[in-house]
Amino acid sequence: MVEWSLPARDDLRAIYEYIALDSKFYARNTVRNIVERASRGSDTPGIGRVVPELGEENVREVFIYSYRIIYQIFPDKLTILAVVHGYRNLQDEDIPVIR
C-alpha cells in the first residue's frame, strides 16, 4: 500500500501549478506519471536508493523526469514523504521523516 503524506501532496500540487502555467496537458501528465511511479514502489520498496542526505536504510528515493520521489518504508506500507526537483539542495530537516 502507498500512502501520500500531506507535504508530498502539497509538492504534487505545486508541481502541477508550475507546469500548468505553460501547459495544463503536460502538468496533468507529469503529475499522473509521478503518482504511477510512486505506486509501483510498493511492489519492490527496496529498489530505490538510500537518500544520501539522511543515510537511513528505510528512507529511499526513486527518480522520474527531474524529480526525486522520497519515501519511507514501513512493514505494511510505503509513505511518500516528498517530491522534489533534483536540483534542489536538500537538507535533512527538509525531508519530513516519520519517527
Image (cartoon, helix red, strand yellow):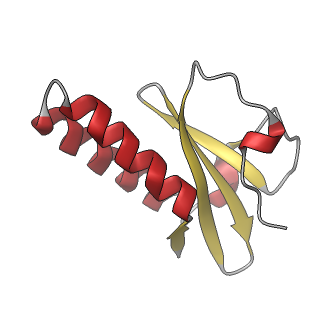
Q: Is residue 50 visible?
A: no
Quarter of the image where the C terminus is located: bottom right
Residue 28: x and y, percent? 20, 45
Q: Quadrant of residue 50?
A: top right
Q: How many marks?
A: 0
Can you say whether 22 is above or below 24 in the image?
A: above
Query: Residue 47, image x and y in percent?
Result: 65, 48
Q: Quadrant of residue 54?
A: top right
Q: Is residue 44 above or below residue 69?
A: below
Q: Is residue 58 left or right of residue 89?
A: right
Query: Where residue 3 appears, x then y in whole percent?
Result: 53, 71
Q: Is residue 97 left or right of residue 10?
A: right
**Observer able to see residue 53:** yes
Q: Nearer the viewer, residue 3 or 57?
A: 3
Residue 89 versus residue 74: which sits nearer the camera? 89
Residue at point 31%, 46% (across, down): 31
The residue under the point 45% across, 57% down is 9
Image height of 18 relative to 69, above or below? above
Q: Residue at x 74, y 78 (%)?
A: 75
